[in-house]
Amino acid sequence: MHQINTDGQWLHLFYQDEDRDDGCANELSLQPANDEHRLNLLLSNHGFNDEPHDATFSLNQADAQALQKYLANWLNDRQKSPSSRGANSYDQA
């Protein structure tokens, strides 16, 4: 099951029973921070005993731009062979 929904300013991506996963529910949630200059990202996984495992990240605008570039490259990378893909670094001065 895969669900995508929004709740106010939150974007939730929910996966359950993925083929390549451990069968536990996973969720990725995004929300602008209160100061509007950061994006909060929450990764959640519930283990086999239903114990929650959460990781929270806060991205600044440079981080979000690097993520946007990375995702755009990934989405456009379907024509390339796996051996032609290289690592990229998105450093900000």
Image (spheres, grey):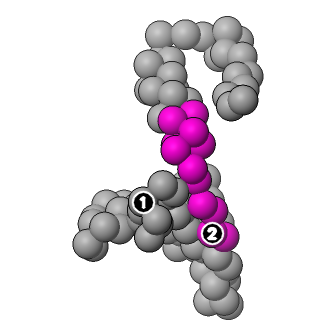
**Nearer the observer, 37 or 51:** 37
| Rendered location of residue 46, percent (x, y) | 60, 80
Kind of residue at disc 1: Glu
Determine crowd level at label 1: few under 14, some 14-19, many 20+ residues with C-alpha closer than 10 A.
few
Q: Secondary structure at mark 2?
A: strand
The residue at 58%/53% (across/down) is 59
Q: Is residue 76 left or right of residue 20?
A: left
| Residue hosting label 2 | 56
| Rendered location of residue 81, percent (x, y) | 60, 10
The residue at 67%/15% (across/down) is 85
Q: Which mark is residue 92?
A: none
Q: Secondary structure at mark 1?
A: loop
Classify 37 as above or below 72.
Answer: below
| Residue hosting label 1 | 36
Look at the image and give the residue range highlighted in magenta.
Answer: 55-67
**Nearer the observer, 8 or 4:** 8
Q: Quadrant of the N terminus?
A: bottom left
**84 inside magenta stretch:** no
Kind of residue at disc 2: Thr
